[in-house]
Amino acid sequence: MNSRRSSIVVGASLALAVAFPTTGRADDKDKDKKTVLHDAVVHFAQPQPQTPDPAPVGAAVTHFLLPDDVTIRKGGTVTFVVNGGGHGIAIHPVSKKTTRDDIAADLCQGGANDADRRGRAAVCNGTRTTTVTINGTPVVVTGTQNLDYNITDAKDDLIIHTGFNIAAPNVVVITNPRVDDTEHTHRLLATSGGVTTSAAGVPSGDASAPGANPAGALLTGSAAPATPGNRIQVQFLKNGRYLVVCMNRGHFLNDHMFGFVSVVGDGDDDDDK
Ligand SMILES: [Cu+2]
């Protein structure tokens, strides 16, 4: 009699366990979990039709990635859809715990918060001048995007050093038209910058020759007439976290045009990054 009763009780509690907590458990597990895609699409600037502000803010309000943080499986891809003019895409590995605030803190500061591009444009823009001293010489730098920035990740490793960008006829001339750091990380992609070319613009194949054309933006997509911009698909073969920046100095350093790709998969093959 005893054994029969206890088996009924066990049976009932099993049924309860199966019937009720399933959805609750799934919700708890998914609450903090990002959606993992195999192939993601990221708009590189506001999708068309874009809605820039009137001058002087202008296109600054369109300079964001959408979505600005995606997670994909190892071996999957991200396709960047380029919207509007002047952009360039560079991808740098960063430490896994790197947050948006880690990167934003190293860029031009202004506005109410990182997302406040309109407010920041009053402080971080192409006309504001800053006097700096370079090798003992006072230099007036026009445009906050042309100052020297050091961008570090959550581990405080230097990821991007921009250097100054100062045009003639200033007393000091330093040519760095793009965010183009090839030294501090193994950059996955760069769509412009100091690539090696011959004078005629034909790839020379000589890595020791300096790049003749460090500027260069992607083609512009537009709403009217409807013209698609560039689409660039990148496959990620290693786990880790990647910083995706616009190589346009104004877009990244003034307007905080950057995002992240996290790559997850079986096995932990990232090299401490
Ligand atoms: Cu851009």
Image (cartoon, grey):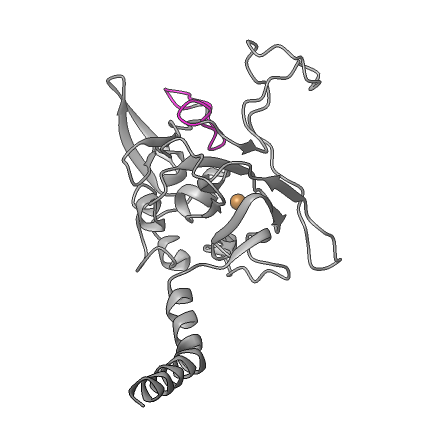
* Image coordinates for residue 231, horizontal then vertical, percent: 67, 45
Dominant secondary-structure state across the stretch colored magenta: loop
The answer to whether residue 148 is visible is: no
Nearer to the camera, 211 or 29: 29
Q: Is residue 134 above or below residue 49?
A: above
Q: Position of residue 243 (x, y in %)?
A: 44, 41
Q: Identify the residue shown where x is 41% and y is 82%.
A: 20
Q: Where in the figure is residue 249, as x and y percent of width and height?
A: 46, 38
In the picture provided, is 234 more to the left or to the right than 130?
A: right
> Camera-side residue: 177 or 23?
23
Name the quadrant of the N terminus: bottom left
Frontmost residue, 42 versus 172: 42
Q: Which residues are magenta?
A: 170-185
Determine whether, in the image, residue 203 is placed left or right of residue 126: right
Say if the magenta span includes residue 175.
Answer: yes
Magenta segment includes 72: no
